[in-house]
Amino acid sequence: EILESLHEDQHTHAEKHFRRLEDLTNDFDCMDREFDIADPEYDSDEATDVFKKCKLVVLRNVFSPEYVQNTLKKMITQYVMSLKTGRTSMDGTTTTGDSHYVSQKEAKRWELLLTEDMIRETSSEVLTNDHFVD
């Protein structure tokens, strides 16, 4: 309904942004495309192009299995336990008003926004991954 009313008035500033959003939701690259950096067919230029177009790209296997098992799993488990026990508040909000820490997507599926400290700690692992930095 909003998009229809905006389409009727081609002169609104917001219309071009909504039209772009509508185009992205119908674009396979932006909605379903994934890249596995461990795949021999992985093409970093192609992933970069998708990122530029969609402002988001899904990359699989960015972290080594050892790092996931020995570091990341422990770090996230401690973080979730901290949220569960109340040591870390789940009531913070992002600039868009979403839950700062936790967002339930469906039954047994949650998205966690990691803390800045966790991002700093994991970024060094990402930056040393030859496939990712390619």
Image (tube, helix red, strand yellow):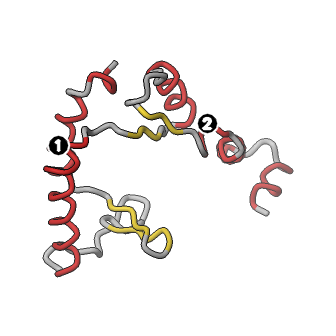
Q: Secondary structure at mark 1?
A: helix
Count of picture labels:
2
Residue displayed at 22% across by 78% down: 84
Q: Residue 24 placed where, x, y %?
A: 65, 42
- Quarter placement of the C terminus: top left
Amino acid type, label 1: Arg
- Quarter placement of the N terminus: bottom right
- Few, some or many residues within 10 Å of mark 1 (<14, 14–19, 20+): few
Q: Which residue is mark 2?
A: 29
Quarter of the rendering containing residue 63 = top left
Judged from this view, the residue extending furthest toward the right is 8
Q: Residue 91 placed where, x, y %?
A: 29, 75
Q: Is residue 43 above or below residue 99?
A: above
Mark pair 1, 2: CA separation:
28 Å
Q: Which residue is mark 1?
A: 120
- Please give left or right for residue 98 compared with residue 30 in the image: left
Q: Residue 39 placed where, x, y %?
A: 43, 28
Q: Nearer the viewer, residue 78 or 42?
A: 42
